[in-house]
Amino acid sequence: MSKKFDLAGLLAERGGEGYQLHARHLNPQLPRMLHTIGFDKVYESAEGAYFRDTDGGDYLDMLAGFGVMGLGRHHPVVRKALHDVLDAELADLTRFDCPPLPGLLAEKLLTYSPHLDRVFFSNSGTEAVETALKFARYATGRPRVLYCTHAFHGLTTGSLSVNGERCFRDGFDPLLPDTAIELGDLAALERELARGDVAALIVEPIQGKGVHEAPPGFLRAAQELLHRRKALLIADEVQTGLGRTGTFYGYQHEDGVEPDLVCVAKALSGGYVPVGATLGKDWIFKKVYSAMDRVLIHSASFGANAQAMVAGLAVLSAMDDEEIVANARTTGELLKSRLAALVDRYEMLHEVRGRGLMIGIEFGRPSSLGLRSRWTMLQAARKGLFAQMVVVPLLQRHRILTQVSGDRLEVIKLIPPLIIGEREVDRFVEAFTAVMDEAHSGGGLIWDFGRTLMKQAVANR
């Protein structure tokens, strides 16, 4: 008789080996990086917007798993729904039937974007983008997709081709024949469209890298230019979608914008089951799936599985019942305004930007001589070190998890669970103020850590 699988026993026996197992069998640089910056914590449990470590300390999550945990961790509605679908013992993924759950989730998703008609379900954000790229090319009969510099649309080969950061692309050429323009540059868009081979422009309403918002009027003007040339607008809402920016979709902050294809993922999962979705217009889907012998021309083995569909339905239900989008808008406005009020107080705090609960905090060169010399030394070693100097004490001393918004950027990005409120805003602002006070005092542990980072950066050259 085979030995029964015992999860609790396995974790009790081997749960403390996480960093060693990663170093031995997975990405070897992850544990090395975490050890270097002091992020090598062991989290034992989580609920809502908080983690707990093995000593019972609570940590405020201002990262939300890169936006996956929109409803926080272990939301009771999503958790119960998943228990229910497992207990139902459905005949799932037969491939030769039309079960109701995918149709029900598609129907619900489309209510938030009534100008769209159909949905393709995949397993992640990058797959949702891959689907949009394929559909746009096939529907228009054109090969080239435009994207914006500094964009991030995923890391599989197609989505990497529209990734605006060279650090991700280096070493993986040749990629697809796509072209970058600056976010907001309508003249460049019109110039590329004039060549007649553009299928679409893909754009994040707010870029995740650096938290840069599309300029007012850009999306609508771009849409008009694209449609005039029979090209499509693709909105990548993988991170900005499902309430993150204070509207259900980020593009909805601008009147008259109706993308032809919309990509979502992350928060739709409820933090449990990977799911991606590509929403599009009826004519695009009918062009791709034009005959019965093309029924599987684009598919995903685990796409539309019952657990993912139920997770998505539960997420949308909870969002409506708990007014999550409105909370993201009001809490985001409170957090942004309180942080923006600190700009005049601190020389190295240059700007606070973003919408809803997607906020960028940018640091820059100070004016006073003493701080300027320290800043210059950090920049000479490696750009982005000051932001990292802020992130580390936020975790180590104040038990708040944040992230630097991209390699070599002096920007911290806040994308907390959409359920946070005034209590979490108070905690973050108080901790951030304490760290900035120390940074501007010109000494203390934060600059000691800065010297450690500089040595590490120089050693890695």
Image (tube, rainbow, N blue to C red):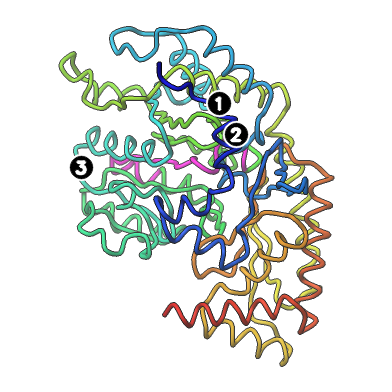
Q: Nearer the viewer, residue 74 or 334?
A: 74
Q: State which quarter of the image contains the C terminus.
A: bottom left
Q: Residue at x 65, y 56 (%)?
A: 402
Q: Going by the image, does 173 lie left or right of 217?
A: left
On the image, numbered disc 3 is attached to which residue? 142
Please, what is the three-letter code of the amino acid marked with disc 2? Phe
Residue 79 figure quarter: top right
Position of 8 with respect to 28 (left or right) is right
Distance (Cα) linking label 1 and label 2: 7 Å
- Depth order, front residue of 260/345: 345
Residue 256 percent location from the top left of the image: 52, 37
Question: How many callouts does the rendering have?
Answer: 3
**Residue 314, quarter of the rendered image:** top right
| Residue 245 against residue 248 in the figure, above or below | below
Q: Which residue is mark 2?
A: 248
Q: Nearer the viewer, residue 175 or 79?
A: 79
Disc 3 residue type (three-letter): Arg
Please rate how many residues cluster around mark 3, counting C-alpha atoms within 10 Å: few if below 14, some from 14 to 19, many from 20. Answer: some
Q: Quadrant of residue 438?
A: bottom right
Relative placement, left or right, of 243 versus 282 is: right
- Percent x, y of residue 386: 63, 74
Q: Residue furthest front?
A: 1
User: Which residue range is magenta in the image?
Assistant: 224-244
Report if the CB atoms under discs 1 and 2 are less than 8 Å apart. Answer: yes
Where does residue 17 sit, x and y in percent of width and height? 54, 49
Between 14 and 188, the residue placed more toward the observer is: 14
Under circle 2, the secondary element is loop
